[in-house]
C-alpha cells in the first residue's frame, strides 16, 4: 500500500496530472469517433513521445485506454454505430433508450457505471499486481512459453469473431510470421529479410498497428459504401431517476466482477466480458422482454464490464509483460520504446513509474466522470464531423505516424501494404487483434522456447515436468477443445436478441 | 533594390557557412547508449565552443550498421560530421553482413567504456572464477551463461573466455536475453549458471549480496568493485564495452588533425569529466593513431571469434542447439500459415454461406484509395507533407462518398484538407520537433 501512496505522489504532480488529463480527453475523443480507437491512437503517438519522460507518456497512454472505454458508449447510444468494439453490446439497448427519449439516463448510467467499475477494478489491480509479481518471479522460460501458448489459444478461439475459427488462426499465424522477420535475438541470424537491409530490424509493431487499424479499417468502411446514421439529440434529464439508480447499481457491480478477471485472462479484450454481462443481466432481469427495447440494465452491466476489463488487462501486462488485447499489445510496445520491460522486475526497478501509472488511473477515472457527464454535449458535437473528412483526417494522421517512426518513405509503402492485408482479413471475417498479439508475443514465445530448451540441454520434458508450466499447457489444451463450444453458445444466445 | 537583396542573401549564406553546424550521428534509436553519448557530446561541445550549432541525428537500425552505411556514403569529405560507434558495431558489421565496415570511416577517438562482470547467484557452489571454469572445461553444456543479445559484448566475452580456456567458441551454452535486466531475473532465479553484463546492470544486486561477482573484464582492478580482473584470475583477456567517435572518409590530414584536436579539447574539459561521472562511464580516452591501432586490433579479434563460430555453426551446431535452430520456428509458422490460408480458401470456395458479402458496393472505391495510398510515399518525398496529405485527404473523402463529386465538393475537400495538413504540419514540426518534408 505504501507503494500506492508513493504512486499518488507521482500521479498528482501537476505536470503528470496534465498529461493524464490530455490522455483521458484524447481517449474520450477517439472513443467517441468511429474508425479510430485506443490501440491506433497510442501507436500514432509513440513516435512523437520518444523525448517525453516515460512516466508522463505512460500515464497519458493509460488515460487514453480508459478514456476510450468511456467515450465509446456515447457513440453507441446516440448513433447506434459503436465507437469501439468494446461498446458493441451497449448499442443494442442504449440506442433504443435514446430513441425512447432516455438518452440522458443511458449516458448517465454508462458514465457512472464506468466510474464505479473503473475505480473498483483499479483497486483490484492495485491488490492483485503485487501478488502476481510474487508468483511471476517463479516463472522461468518454460513457464513463459506455456503461458504464451495459452494466450495464443485463447485469443484465437475466443476472438474467432464473425468468421470461422480457422480465420482466427490465420490471423495469428500471419502475426507470428511477421514477428519473425529480422535479426533473431538469440543467434543474431537474419530471417525472412530476403537481402533487404530495411527488414533487418524486423517489422515495427507501430507500423502494423497503424496499417491494420487505420488503413485497413478505412478501406473496409469505404468498400461497404456510405451509410448515413442520424445522431440522436440528447433528450431527457442527464440525471437518473430513483428507479433507474435502483436498476443500475447491481449490474454495475456484476459487470465489474465479470469484467476484471476476464480482462486479465488472455482472451483478447473487452468484447467477451461485455457479451457475458449482457447475457447474465438478461437472465437475472425482472422483465427480460424489455431487453432489446431499451433496458437500462443492458447498458449499465456491459459498460461496467468493459471498464473493469481494461483494468484487468493491465494485470498481466504489467506483471508478466503479457498483452491480452490489441491495445495492450501496443502499450507493451510503448514500454519497450522507453527501454522498459514490463514484468516482475519492473515493479522492483521502477516502482515509482508503475505505481504512478496505477495511481493515475484512479485520478483519470474521476476526470473521466466529469468529462463524460456534464460535458457530454461537447463530445456529441464531435460526432457531427462529416464522415468523409473524418476518414480523410485519419488517413493523413496514419501516414504521418508511419512516417515519423523512422522518417522513412519505405515505412509508408509497408503501412499501405499492411493496410490492404487488414482489409483482406476483414473481408474474410478474420479478427485483426491476433495479428498484433502474434507479432508482439511471437518473438518472445520463440525465444523462451529456445532458451528453455537450451537450459535443459534439449530436453522437451521441461515443459511438462515443471508443475506450473504443465498446468498452463493443460488449460490451453482444454480451451482449445472446450472453448469452441462455449463461444458458439455465447454467440447464439446473443443472436436470438 | 534587387541587388541589395542578393547581397544580403550572399552575406547570410556566407555566415551560415562560416559556422557550419557540427552534425553528430547516433546510429541508434533515441534513449540508448549511443544516443546518450551523442547528446552528451552535443551538450559539452555547445558549452566549450559557444556559437557552434551542434545537431544530433538518429539513424537507428541493424546494430548501427544502417547509420554507418549512410554516414560513410553521404558525409564523405565533411569535416563537421561525427558518428558515434562502439564495440557492438564491430560485431554488428559481421553478423549483419554489412557491406560497409568501420574501416571505411576515419577513426577519431575512443571516449568511454564500461567493464563487464561475471556473476553467479549468492547460493551458487562456485566461489571463484576458477571453480566455475573447472566445471565449464569438464562439461561445457552444463554451464549456461546468461547475457544480452547474441553477438553483443556479453556474448563475445563468454566466447573469448571459452577460447582462452581451450574450448571452441561454439561449445558455449550461451542464453541470450533481451537485456541485462532479463538476464538478471534468470540468474537470480537460478535458471542459468552464471550471467554476464555491464557492471552497472548488476551493481545493485552485487551490493545487496544477492549476486557474487567472480571477475571483471577490465584490464586493471577497479577500486569500487569487489572482484578480481580476469587477468588476475589467470585468464589473459580483457574487454570493455567501449564507445568512440569516427569521422567520414575522405578528410585531408589537416582536417583530420583539427577534428582530433577539437575532440581532445572536449574530452579534457571539466564539463565532459562531470558528464562521465554523472553517467557512470569510465574514461577510456584514446585519440589519433593509438585509437586507429586499437580499432584494428579489436576488429580482428572480434572477427576471428565470430568467424570461427559461424564456421562451426555451418559444420554442425552444438549439441544443445540441435532441437530448435533459429529457422525452425519461422519455417513452421509460415508452413502452418500457408496450410490454414489454403484451407480457408478451399472452405470458402466450396460455397459455404459466408456472412460477408463477397463484393461490397464500394470495392472499386477501396481499390482507388489503395492506389492513392501507394502513390503517397513518392508524393511525400517529392512534393512534401502538405501536398501529399491534402491529396490523400481528398481522395479518401471522395472514395468514402462513392459518387462522382461536384466541383464545389472537391473544392471544399481540398480546402479542408489543406487547412488540416497545414495545422498538423505546424503542430508537429514546431510543436513536437518532428522533421517533415
Image: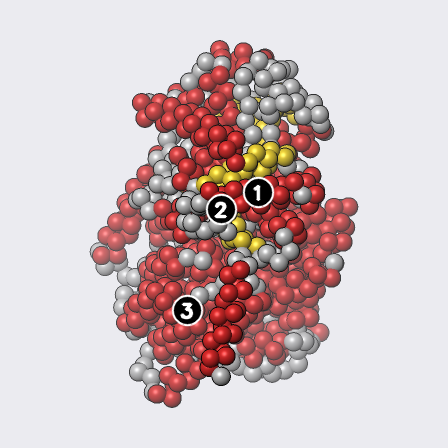
Whether residue A251 is situated above or below residue A204 in the rendered picture: below
Residue at image x 49%, y 67%? B13
The residue that disc 3 covers is: B384
Determine the chain carrying the residue at label 3: B
Whether residue B238 is situated above or below residue B348 in the rendered picture: above
Q: Quadrant of residue B250?
A: top left
Task: Tell if the residue under mark 2 belongs to the same chain as the one under mark 3.
Answer: yes
Q: Is residue A464 left or right of residue A28?
A: left
Give the distance between the C-alpha atoms of the residues marked 1 and 2, in whole angstroms.
10 Å
Give the mark nearer the N terminus: 2 vs 3. 2
Mark linked to residue B91: none
Query: How many marks overall?
Result: 3
The residue that disc 2 covers is: B255
Give the mark nearer the N terminus: 1 vs 2. 2
Residue B263: percent from the left, percent from the top? 58, 43
Say which element carries label 2.
helix
| Residue with the most extreme left position | B350
Determine the chain carrying the residue at label 2: B
Residue A122: percent from the left, percent from the top? 67, 54
Say which element carries label 1.
helix
Amino acid at each position: 500500500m505504501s507503494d500506492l501512496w508513493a504512486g499518488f505522489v507521482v500521479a498528482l504532480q501537476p505536470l503528470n496530472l496534465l498529461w493524464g488529463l490530455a490522455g483521458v480527453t484524447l481517449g474520450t475523443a477517439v472513443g467517441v469517433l468511429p474508425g479510430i480507437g485506443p490501440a491506433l491512437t497510442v501507436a500514432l503517438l509513440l513516435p512523437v513521445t520518444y523525448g517525453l519522460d516515460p512516466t508522463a507518456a505512460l500515464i497519458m497512454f493509460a488515460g487514453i485506454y480508459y478514456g476510450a472505454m468511456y467515450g465509446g458508449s456515447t457513440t453507441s447510444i446516440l448513433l447506434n454505430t459503436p465507437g469501439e468494439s468494446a461498446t458493441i453490446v451497449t448499442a443494442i439497448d442504449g440506442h433504443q433508450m435514446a430513441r425512447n427519449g432516455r438518452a440522458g439516463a443511458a449516458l448517465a448510467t454508462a458514465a457512472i457505471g464506468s466510474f464505479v467499475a473503473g475505480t473498483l477494478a483499479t483497486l483490484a489491480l492495485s491488490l492483485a499486481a503485487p501478488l502476481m509479481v510474487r508468483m511471476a518471479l517463479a516463472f522461468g522460460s518454460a513457464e513463459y512459453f506455456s503461458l504464451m501458448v495459452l494466450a495464443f489459444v485463447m485469443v484465437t478461439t475466443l476472438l474467432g469473431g464473425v468468421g470461422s475459427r480457422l480465420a482466427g488462426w490465420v490471423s495469428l499465424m500471419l502475426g507470428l510470421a511477421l514477428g519473425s522477420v529480422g535479426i533473431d535475438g538469440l543467434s543474431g541470424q537474419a530471417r525472412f529479410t530476403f537481402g533487404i537491409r530495411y527488414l533487418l530490424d524486423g517489422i515495427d509493431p507501430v507500423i502494423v498497428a497503424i496499417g491494420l487499424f487505420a488503413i485497413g479499417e478505412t478501406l473496409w468502411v469505404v468498400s461497404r459504401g456510405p451509410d448515413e446514421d442520424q445522431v440522436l439529440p440528447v433528450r431527457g434529464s442527464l440525471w437518473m431517476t430513483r428507479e433507474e439508480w435502483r436498476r443500475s447499481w447491481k449490474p454495475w457491480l456484476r459487470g465489474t466482477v465479470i469484467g476484471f478477471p476476464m480482462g486479465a485472462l488472455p482472451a483478447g479484450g473487452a468484447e467477451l466480458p461485455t457479451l457475458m454481462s449482457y447475457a447474465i443481466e438478461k437472465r437475472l432481469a425482472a422483465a427480460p422482454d424489455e431487453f432489446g427495447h431499451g433496458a437500462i440494465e443492458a447498458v449499465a452491466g456491459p459498460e461496467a464490464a468493459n471498464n473493469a476489463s481494461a483494468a484487468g488487462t493491465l494485470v498481466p501486462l504489467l506483471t508478466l509483460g503479457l498483452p491480452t488485447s490489441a491495445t495492450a499489445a501496443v502499450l507493451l510496445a510503448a514500454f519497450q520504446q522507453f527501454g522498459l520491460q514490463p514484468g516482475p522486475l519492473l515493479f522492483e526497478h521502477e516502482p515509482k513509474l508503475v505505481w504512478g501509472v496505477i495511481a493515475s488511473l484512479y485520478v483519470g477515472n474521476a476526470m473521466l466522470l466529469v468529462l463524460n457527464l456534464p460535458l457530454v454535449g461537447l463530445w456529441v458535437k464531435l460526432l457531427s464531423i462529416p464522415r468523409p473528412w473524418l476518414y480523410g483526417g485519419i488517413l493523413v494522421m496514419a501516414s504521418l505516424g508511419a512516417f515519423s517512426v523512422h522518417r522513412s518513405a519505405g515505412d509508408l509503402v509497408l503501412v499501405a501494404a499492411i493496410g490492404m492485408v487488414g482489409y483482406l482479413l476483414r473481408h474474410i471475417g478474420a479478427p485483426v487483434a491476433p495479428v498484433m498479439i502474434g507479432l508482439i508475443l511471437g518473438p518472445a514465445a520463440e525465444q523462451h522456447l529456445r532458451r528453455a530448451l537450451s537450459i535443459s540441454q534439449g530436453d522437451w520434458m521441461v515443459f511438462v515436468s515443471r508443475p506450473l508450466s504443465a498446468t498452463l499447457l493443460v488449460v490451453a489444451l482444454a480451451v482449445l477443445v472446450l472453448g469452441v463450444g462455449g463461444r458458439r453458445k455465447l454467440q447464439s444466445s446473443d443472436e436470438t436478441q | 533594390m534587387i541587388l541589395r537583396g542578393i547581397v544580403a542573401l550572399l552575406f547570410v549564406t556566407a555566415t551560415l557557412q562560416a559556422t557550419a553546424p557540427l552534425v553528430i550521428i547516433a546510429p541508434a534509436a533515441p534513449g540508448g547508449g549511443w544516443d546518450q553519448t551523442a547528446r552528451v557530446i552535443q551538450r559539452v561541445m555547445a558549452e566549450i565552443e559557444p556559437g557552434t550549432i551542434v545537431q544530433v541525428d538518429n539513424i537507428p537500425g541493424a546494430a548501427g550498421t544502417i547509420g554507418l552505411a549512410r554516414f560513410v556514403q553521404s558525409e564523405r569529405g565533411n569535416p563537421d560530421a561525427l558518428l558515434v560507434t562502439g564495440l557492438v558495431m564491430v560485431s554488428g558489421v559481421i553478423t549483419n553482413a554489412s557491406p560497409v565496415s568501420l574501416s571505411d570511416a576515419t577513426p577519431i577517438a575512443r571516449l568511454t567504456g564500461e567493464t563487464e562482470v561475471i556473476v553467479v547467484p549468492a547460493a551458487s557452489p562456485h566461489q571463484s572464477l576458477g571453480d566455475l571454469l573447472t566445471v565449464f572445461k569438464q562439461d561445457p553444456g552444463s554451464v549456461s551463461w546468461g547475457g544480452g543479445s547474441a553477438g553483443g559484448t556479453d556474448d563475445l566475452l563468454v566466447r573469448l573466455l571459452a577460447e582462452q580456456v581451450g574450448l571452441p567458441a561454439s561449445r558455449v551454452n550461451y542464453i541470450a536475453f533481451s537485456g541485462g535486466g532479463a538476464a538478471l531475473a534468470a540468474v537470480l532465479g537460478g535458471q542459468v549458471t552464471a550471467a554476464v553484463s555491464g557492471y552497472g546492470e548488476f551493481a545493485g544486486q552485487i551490493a545487496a549480496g544477492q549476486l557474487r561477482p567472480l571477475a571483471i573484464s577490465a584490464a586493471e582492478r577497479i577500486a569500487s568493485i569487489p572482484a578480481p580482473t580476469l587477468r588476475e584470475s589467470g585468464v589473459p583477456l580483457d574487454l570493455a564495452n567501449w564507445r568512440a567517435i569516427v569521422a567520414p572518409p575522405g578528410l585531408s590530414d589537416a582536417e583530420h588533425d583539427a577534428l582530433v584536436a577539437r575532440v581532445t579539447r572536449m574530452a579534457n574539459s571539466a564539463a565532459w569529466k562531470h558528464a562521465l561521472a554523472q553517467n557512470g562511464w569510465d574514461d577510456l580516452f584514446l585519440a589519433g593513431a593509438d585509437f586507429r591501432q586499437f580499432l584494428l586490433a579489436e576488429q580482428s579479434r572480434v572477427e576471428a571469434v565470430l568467424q570461427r563460430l559461424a564456421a562451426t555453426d555451418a559444420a554442425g551446431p552444438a549439441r544443445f542447439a540441435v532441437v530448435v535452430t533459429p529457422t525452425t520456428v519461422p519455417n513452421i509458422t509460415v508452413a502452418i500459415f500457408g496450410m490454414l490460408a489454403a484451407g480457408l480458401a478451399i472452405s470458402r470456395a466450396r460455397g459455404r454461406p459466408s456472412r460477408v458479402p463477397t463484393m461490397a458496393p464500394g470495392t472499386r472505391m477501396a481499390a482507388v484509395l489503395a492506389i492513392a495510398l501507394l502513390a503517397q510515399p513518392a508524393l511525400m518525398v517529392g512534393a512534401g507533407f502538405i501536398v501529399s496529405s491534402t491529396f490523400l485527404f481528398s481522395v479518401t473523402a471522395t472514395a468514402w462518398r462513392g459518387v462522382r463529386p461536384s466541383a464545389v465538393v472537391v473544392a471544399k475537400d481540398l480546402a479542408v484538407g489543406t487547412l488540416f495538413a497545414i495545422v498538423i504540419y505546424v503542430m508537429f514540426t514546431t510543436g513536437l520537433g518532428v522533421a517533415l518534408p
